[in-house]
Amino acid sequence: MSVMSEKKPKEQGGFGETVRVVIHALILALIVRTFLFQPFNIPSGSMMPTLLIGDYLFVSKFSYGYSRYSFPFGPNLFSGRIWASEPDRGDVVVFKLPRDQKTDYIKRVIGLPGDEIQVRDGLLYINGQEVERERIDDFVETEPNGSTTRVHQFRETLPNGVSYNILELGDNGFGDNTPVYKVPEGHFFMMGDNRDNSTDSRFLSAVGYVPFENLVGRADLIYFSIDDDTPLWEVWKWPTELRFGRFFDIVR
């Protein structure tokens, strides 16, 4: 009588399985980053008080459809946008700087195609109409040495009802009196909420009008925030330096 030897099941796991898991994870992350949400961090104060240095946020990639800049490295696969949907006035958006097509900027959409935009004595005008601006409590910023800086803060309300806070050092700064800007078709006019500390569409040679194609996505959610003087890797400082009150704030 012959005895049939049992076959041992093929061992699973090992280095090959680990590589497959890593590859699958990278592909999934690439799909999410390209088509759904991409993380960004805020390196400057041009959008204060809405966004602070040290904020980390998710930008929705599907809000305005997809362009070449939706993909890593911006490959020239096609022109324009597919499944396009124009931003609303007041949206906070990430876009590629038109001057170099590489640098990521984040600003608020103020002017739509065909609009006329002007700033006079610090007041914003859209199509000849003054945008409502109400003085509110000063914005107070605490320096590392404990000193505080107070900046005039206003509540600005756009014609479509979108309302947000802006900062103004004064009403006679370099960007507080401008010519009338006529926004070209297929372009948008962007401004930072920190009006006297923002390089934006008011400065045509630096930013200027932003093509629809250059929009990367809409800023939706702050998921993490840390004091701007604390490097992210200094985790032992997190208990005192994290701004927990900003976690999961909706960007408006």
Image: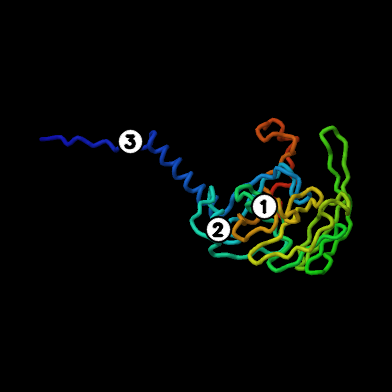
Q: Say which residue appears at 87% left-offset and 60% top-offset.
A: 134
In this rendering, position of residue 186 left or right of residue 34: right
Specify the amino acid type for callout 3: Glu
Mark 1 and mark 2 lie on one chain; the one further toward the N terminus is 2
User: Which one is in front in this view, the residue at disc 1 or the one at disc 3?
Assistant: 1
Give the camera-side residue of 122 and 178.
178
Give the camera-side residue of 205 and 189.
205
Mark 1, residue position: 221
Marks 1/3 in contact by CB < 8 Å: the verdict is no
Examine the rendering and report whether any part of residue 52 can be seen.
yes
Q: Quadrant of the C terminus?
A: bottom right
Q: Quadrant of the N terminus?
A: top left
User: Which one is in front in this view, the residue at disc 3 or the one at disc 2?
Assistant: 2
In the figure, 207 relative to 11: above or below? Answer: below
Mark 2, residue position: 67
Instruction: Give the quadrant of residue 241.
Output: top right
